[in-house]
Amino acid sequence: MEEQKTSWSLDLLMVRNIPVRIHYSFFLLPLYVLLSNRQSAANLSFELALISLLFVCIALHELGHAFMARYFNIETRDITLYPF
């Protein structure tokens, strides 16, 4: 089966032949934090670290779904992460 890539996504990595992608709209979230946070650098770095940690947790969660699907012989074509 031919792989279809969403035109609005960026390839991040491949995990066990499963492409992991991030939708370009995901970058609006850190951009919003950068533009709206004018209080302190510590607050800004905390919020950006929190967004990064949330992204990693969601990616690991979705990889868990993909690995279980593979375990039950269900095809997983890709994982695309969205901010919403």
Image (cartoon, rainbow, N blue to C red):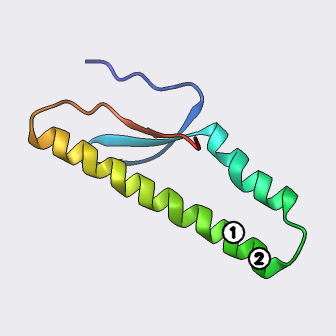
Residue at x-position 9% and y-position 37%: 72
Amino acid identity at mark 1? Glu
Q: Is the C-beta separation of discs 1 and 2 under 8 Å? A: yes
Q: Dot 2 corresponds to which residue?
A: 43
Q: Position of residue 4 (x, y in %)?
A: 41, 21
Residue placed most toward the observer, 39 or 30: 39
Please tell me whether mark 2 sits on a helix, a strand or a loop: helix
Residue 62: image tag: none
Quarter holding residue 79: top left
Q: Dot 1 corresponds to which residue?
A: 47
Instruction: Tally the marks.
Output: 2
Q: In the image as oriented, which residue stretches furthest toward the bottom?
A: 42
Q: Position of residue 26 (x, y in %)?
A: 63, 44
Residue at x-position 46% and y-position 26%: 5
Image side of residue 38 versus residue 72, left or right: right
Image side of residue 10 versus residue 61, left or right: right
Q: In the image as oriented, which residue stretches furthest toward the right?
A: 38
Q: Position of residue 73 (x, y in %)?
A: 10, 33
Q: For mark 2, does the 10 Å Cα neighbourhood hold few (<14), some (14 to 19), or many (20 or more) residues?
A: few
Quarter holding residue 46: bottom right
Quarter holding residue 77: top left
Q: For mark 1, does the 10 Å Cα neighbourhood hold few (<14), some (14 to 19), or many (20 or more) residues?
A: some
Image side of residue 49 versus residue 74, left or right: right
Quadrant of the drawing holding the N terminus:
top left
Please tell me whether mark 1 sits on a helix, a strand or a loop: helix
Q: Position of residue 67 (x, y in %)?
A: 20, 47
Give the CA separation, mark 1 to mark 2.
6 Å
Look at the picture and state if 63 lies above or below 82.
below
